Image: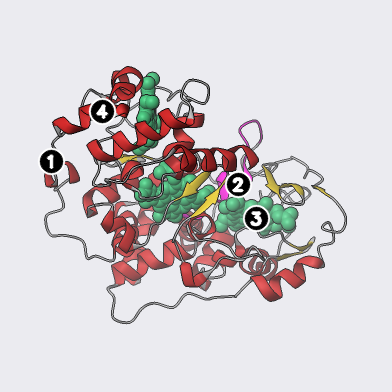
Amino acid sequence: MKPSLKVSVICGLLLSSGAVYAQAPLPANMAQLIAQGKYLATAGDCDGCHTIASGQVYGGGRAFDTPFGTLYSTNISSDKQYGIGNYTYQQFVDAVRNGVAPIGNLYPAMPYASYHRISDHDMQALYAYFMHTKPATQPNRENGIGFPFNIRMGLKLWNLVGFDKATFKPTADKSPLWNRGKYLVQGLGHCGECHTPRNFMMATEQDHALEGAVVNYLNAPNITAKNLTQEKWTFHDLAQFLKTGQSPKGTAFDDMYVVEKHSLTQLNDHDITAITSYLLDQAQPQSSSKSQSKLTPLAVSPLDTKLPGYRIYMDKCSGCHGLSGQGLPNVAPALKNNATIEDSNIFNTVAVLTNGISQQGYNQQQSYYTMPGYKNSLNDQQMADLITYLHHSFSTQITTTTAKQVAAIKKQLSNN
Ligand code: HEC
Ligand code: HEC
Ligand code: HEC
């Protein structure tokens, strides 16, 4: 762990773009701890949930829909009246790692079950940083959660059955790099909050960690090493996807785009490599320049042009995604070898075709068009034919999709 910690400190310092608020000069070791805490807050995406576009940084107010009503994130800036500026270190630990704040037990929308794995050292750095953020004078919003769920005491019960209080345990026979990845994925990165299925008590099923779950109209796909390997993710392509939100295997969209924008794209290369190593369960390759596109050139079989979906593809999709699914620079990503198409679970393909993808600004050189939705212009049978064509031509999936399968997913999308 030692070397990687050093890397994050340095990177934290380099990344200090948003100034840290301090009244008096700080001792050097304190300044370093704060810089480290700032980087860790990025890795934990605290900002993504505790800041809204129209509000002050860390001022809270982001709405979360729960089965019981709407919940709002709180002001966690250093403001002593509206924020957490009066928190002692112990209160901060109790809130972030145990979900017990001075206001009572926290709803698990705050991912404390994952954060329970954060190390003591990292908690100290986070505390140092959060006591020095710019105070936000934004009052907390009342939660719209009705009786009996507004009783925070009830969450005590959830904590008994739904919160396994797992601490981080490095795996002895794995490298420090792999274990750094495990620490980030399971702890601060809280990837399992979306990618791990939940049981009827809404607790994540650790026996099925990262095997995929539907959250907010999309499937957070199965990202176990087994599935990623089946989908032919290479080390290079996965690291590129995590670092930039796009790769020869497709782009990050919707919720995953938010994770990329606020958190992953701002992590240092060492941490990206660590996460990739853990997810693929592979050591970093010596020469990491090989990309998926060079590995499996897929020839379009002339038979595929006889599939009914071929015409639909040519008519509706090829203008942006290319005649042979190769993608067009600054227009749309390649669909050939695309992980969403390669996934045997067609949920996201149907979701994207139904609802489209709104414009996403990457701060890289790359920008894309908006992907339109086809809710009203493709019926279930046409969508099924199209997916069958996409699978045959652009992936290794050779199954036939039926109108019934499409209809079932569309129903789930409109019920959600
Ligand atoms: C996925 C969304 C999400 C992320 C990520 C997140 N939080 Fe929260 N947090 C919430 C919500 C929602 C609440 C309010 C819960 C409630 O009212 O029961 C909350 C509450 C809190 C509280 C209690 C505040 C109070 O008013 O007493 C603290 C402290 C806190 N979060 C700190 C953090 C820190 C530090 C991070 C990053 C390491 C973080 N949060 C990341 C959603 C999130
Ligand atoms: C106007 C251009 C445009 C058209 C037409 C279009 N798309 Fe897209 N599509 C995009 C863009 C841009 C993205 C990536 C959006 C992002 O991530 O920001 C995308 C993403 C996708 C994805 C998700 C994969 C990924 O990695 O992002 C699938 C699947 C997809 N398109 C299929 C289709 C199909 C099938 C059609 C024809 C019915 C189609 N698209 C028509 C622009 C288009
Ligand atoms: C807020 C929910 C959420 C969180 C948190 C989240 N993801 Fe995702 N992730 C998604 C969704 C939804 C998709 C599908 C859309 C896409 O492909 O971009 C996705 C897609 C992915 C993919 C592409 C998989 C494929 O085969 O297409 C990878 C890899 C991934 N996530 C890794 C991660 C990692 C690593 C973390 C933690 C650092 C993480 N995700 C955290 C929701 C989430």
Mark 1 or mark 2, which is nearer to you?
A: 1
Residue 398 image-quadrant placement: top left
Mark 2 or mark 4, which is nearer to you?
A: 4
Q: Secondary structure at mark 3?
A: loop
Residue located at (50% from left, 66% from top): 122
Label of residue 327 in the image: 4
- Answer left or right for 81 relative to 382: right
Residue tagged by mark 1? 297
Residue sitting nearer the eye, 89 or 375:
375
Label of residue 109 in the image: 3
| Distance Cα–Cα, label 2 vs label 4 | 33 Å
Q: x, y percentage for residue 345?
A: 41, 49
Label of residue 261 in the image: none
Labels 3 and 2 touching (C-beta < 8 A): yes
| Distance Cα–Cα, label 1 vs label 2 | 41 Å
Q: Earlier in the sequence, mark 1 or mark 3?
A: 3
Q: The residue under label 4 is which amino acid type? A: Gly
Q: Secondary structure at mark 4?
A: loop
Residue tagged by mark 2? 49
* Quarter of the rendered structure image containing ligand 1: bottom right
Outermost residue toward the bottom in this view: 172
Q: The residue under label 1 is which amino acid type? A: Pro
Bounds of the magenta segment: 42-55
Q: Is residue 211 magenta?
A: no
Q: Determine if the C-beta at disc 2 is less than 8 A from ligand 1.
A: yes
Residue located at (53% from left, 50% from top): 214
Labels 1 and 4 touching (C-beta < 8 A): no
Q: Is residue 3 above or below residue 393?
A: below
Q: Determine if the C-beta at disc 3 is less than 8 A from ligand 1.
A: yes
Q: Residues within 10 Å of mark 2 (few under 14, many from 20)?
A: many
Q: Earlier in the sequence, mark 2 or mark 4?
A: 2
